[in-house]
Amino acid sequence: LSNVNNSEVHLEAIFNINKYTVTFMDQNSVYEIKENINHGNAVSAPEENPSKAHNHFVGWKINGEENLYDFDTPVTSNLILVSVYEEIEMPIIIATPTEWTKDSVTVTMENSHNYDMRIKVGTNNYVDYTTPVEVTENLEVRGKSIVGAEESNEATKTIDNIDKESPTIENEIEKDAS
């Protein structure tokens, strides 16, 4: 460029890169804040995932959006990312037979997500559930689904249809005739 006197003029442009803040929110509280993220750079997720009782952490999403946040996305504004959880489904405890029996009841557990499960029979401790369990006395059976270090709420089934003595059933018609 030249000016009126035909002397050379040098111009220098100075740009400040915008810096942004990404706030990670978990259950309506600030979990972590990452500041000074340069415009166009990606932000990384917190090193440790948050946790919530009876839930499995799925990831982070922009507040108000449906999809999980893609951490390869360039940051172009301040962001609020909220934690996303999936409730861990309790197992369904099934006892067969359901009618009176004098021998035993077979207890099985299932869930629709194929989670690992643990079972507690009576006053025993919880153990990994791998196969059906034979129960020979009336008691309470408890079960939990497990995902990583998190577990579901406890499911309970009362077994009360085992009677070692044959019941006596009086015929009401014969009783009335007497």
Image (cartoon, helix red, strand yellow):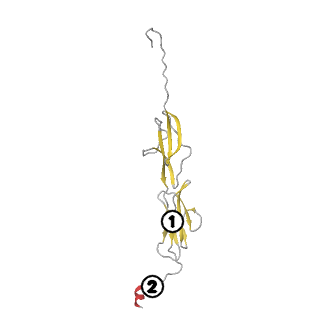
Q: In the current view of this chain or complex, which residue is farthest to the top?
A: 5
Local secondary structure at mark 2: loop
> Counting other residues with Cα less than 10 Å from the Cα at mark 2, is it few (<14), some (14-19), or many (20 or more)?
few
Instruction: Give, as a three-letter code, the residue at label 2.
Output: Glu
| Label whose residue precedes the other's in the sequence (1 or 2) | 1
Front residue of 137 and 22: 22
Instruction: Give, as a three-letter code, the residue at label 1.
Output: Thr
Quadrant showing the C terminus = bottom left
Q: Which residue is mark 1?
A: 156
Front residue of 80 and 98: 80
Q: In the current view of this chain or complex, which residue is farthest to the front?
A: 29
Q: Which residue is mark 2?
A: 170
Local secondary structure at mark 1: strand
Q: Which mark is residue 35?
A: none
User: Residue 111: horizontal and vertical position, in percent?
Assistant: 48, 60
Q: CA distance from mark 1 to mark 2?
A: 33 Å
Q: Is residue 7 above or below residue 142?
A: above
Residue drawn at (53%, 67%), measured in percent from left and top? Answer: 141
User: Residue 176: horizontal and vertical position, in percent?
Assistant: 40, 88
Quadrant showing the N terminus = top left
Residue drawn at (49%, 69%), measured in percent from left and top? Answer: 95
Q: Is residue 119 above or below residue 12?
A: below
Q: Is residue 132 something that shows in the picture? A: no
Q: How many tags in the picture?
A: 2
User: Residue 129: horizontal and vertical position, in percent?
Assistant: 55, 62
